[in-house]
Image: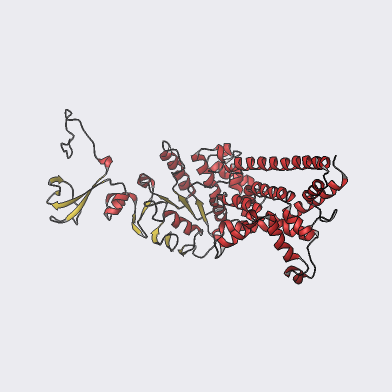
Amino acid sequence: MPEPEFFLALRLSLLVASLSAVLLLLLGTPLAWALAFRDFPGKALLEAVFLLPLVLPPTVLGFYLLLFLGPEGPWTKLIGVSWAFRLEGLLFASVLFSLPFALTAYREAFLSLDRDLLEVARTLGVPRRKAYARVVFPLVWPGLLSGTLLAFAHTLGEFGVVLMVGGSIPGKTQMVSIYLYDLVQALRFAEAAKASSFLLLLSLLILVSVRLLEGRWRAWRSTTG
Amino acid sequence: MEVHYRVRRPIRLEARFRVQGFTLLLGESGVGKTTLLKALAGLLPAEGTPYGGLPPEKRPIGYLPQDLALFPHMTAWENVAFPLHGKDAKAKALALLERVGLLDHAHKRPRALSGGQKQRVALARALARSPEVLLLDEPTSALDPLTKDQVLAELIALIRQEGLPALAVSHDPALAGMADWLVVLGRGRVLQEGPPDEVMAAPGSVEVARLLGYQNLFPARVVEGGVVVEGVFLRLPLPPWARPGRRAWLGVRAEEVIVVREDRPLPRKTCWRAS
């Protein structure tokens, strides 16, 4: 078994990953809906900005976030406290970093929704809330969940951004990927191997669940018409 | 029911016509038939009567889109119960399914149903919200070509039994014979309306004649007792407006022509020798 420090770092990673997954679900769902179905000026630019973390080197994103959240940054001036090297900063960075993954998956889920279903539901005299709860949600939730799981796994594996924003304070901001890097730097390969195999299994498990969810989603979709 | 609607987007269209009994709105693809139905259902921005300005959920209409849009994750009875509420929703849904003859299939998902059965589930679901009028978009498109006429005739019989006016749009003139009232839609406006046999017998223009399935149209000159087409005299009963010397169109439906072998006795009709 890996040593206790590993589980401390893993616990922090899991906490950051779960909280940012929930935040992404809350923020990303309405955003993805707007991107899928609404037209507004500047939409292409907005999409590009949201997708930027996909192509930007994580350290570049981390650097700007550090400036933004650091003691002299605009965010600190606004709320009166610096989020750099704290859990809040890690969360902020993780949400931004995983946003493109979640957003793309959510938008896909909405776009493959047959719009006729929603239109017919509206002509059937039910309130809009009921149409969303009984028609849209049951058909898109597997897509939303698989996007959220992907974002969760992605956050679990992030390195550059969290290193820049959070540093490596054991028990406070040392995420599991940074812990592993520190082990290798200290030439402790045996511990690094144990920690790595544990993470490998965990990531595999998440991806298998995503595939299974997608399978179920496809099976449902094919029943249309 | 008088319908008068004006749509600007996606197609510019102004249509004024009557809906009585099972009304067929006939038009080529792209003239805005679906647009007009959606406008009536409140799904597109449009102005007009009836129901102008109301949101879709407030309009007493039953809309059956081309693909029927049954909810794939619900069984037939759950689909029908969707617009209903209260404890007896299931009982009401089952009663409606019985009315359309599908009680035995109540627990099936849409994918396990045939095209005609899906159509009847969609009808039962539309009836559940007690509409004043039914709107059907290309009702034969989801049907098997071999059985579509029969399935559609059954659907129309069910709709008549409910005593509801219905507006069906289609590009298929073969459906005209089943309708109580026929409306021909051209680009942006209504070209002609009336009882199907009257419209069929006297299309108001060449465009209407083409839409009604007159595949053969020839320019003709009216003479005493008939017309002359490309030098050939045809003995025909003439309509009152056809005075000798006037130009006209001669329309021949493919099913009005028979081809007879040369060695057989000639039928007692107008005959031509052709190669």
Q: Is residue B221 left or right of residue A43?
A: left
Foreground pick, B137 / B87:
B137
Q: Residue B52: give x, y in percent of width and height.
A: 49, 64
Q: Nearer the viewer, residue B48 or B179?
A: B48
Which residue is at a point 18% across and 28% down the rendered structure image?
Answer: B264
Q: Quadrant of residue B58?
A: bottom right
Q: Is residue B187 left or right of residue B106?
A: left
Q: Quadrant of the N terminus of chain B?
A: bottom left
- Judged left or right of residue B2, residue B205 is left
Residue closer to the observer: A159 or B114: A159
Q: Which image quadrant is residue A26 in?
A: bottom right
Quadrant location of the C terminus of chain B in the rendered image: top left
- Counting the numbered discs, the total is 0
Q: Residue at x 68, y 59 (%)?
A: A60
The image shows residue A217, relative to residue A48, as above or below, that is above
- The image shows residue B195, relative to residue A193, as above or below, that is below
Residue reaching furthest right? A4
Q: In this view of the protein, can residue A26 be seen by the observer?
A: no
Rendered view: B106 above or below B58:
above
Q: Position of residue B175 (x, y in %)?
A: 38, 45
Q: Residue at x 64, y 45 (%)?
A: B90
- Looking at the image, what colour scheme do you see? secondary structure
- The residue nearer to you, when weighing B3 against B46, is B46
Q: Position of residue B108 (x, y in %)?
A: 59, 38
Q: Is residue B99 visible?
A: yes
Percent of width and height locating residue A205: 73, 40
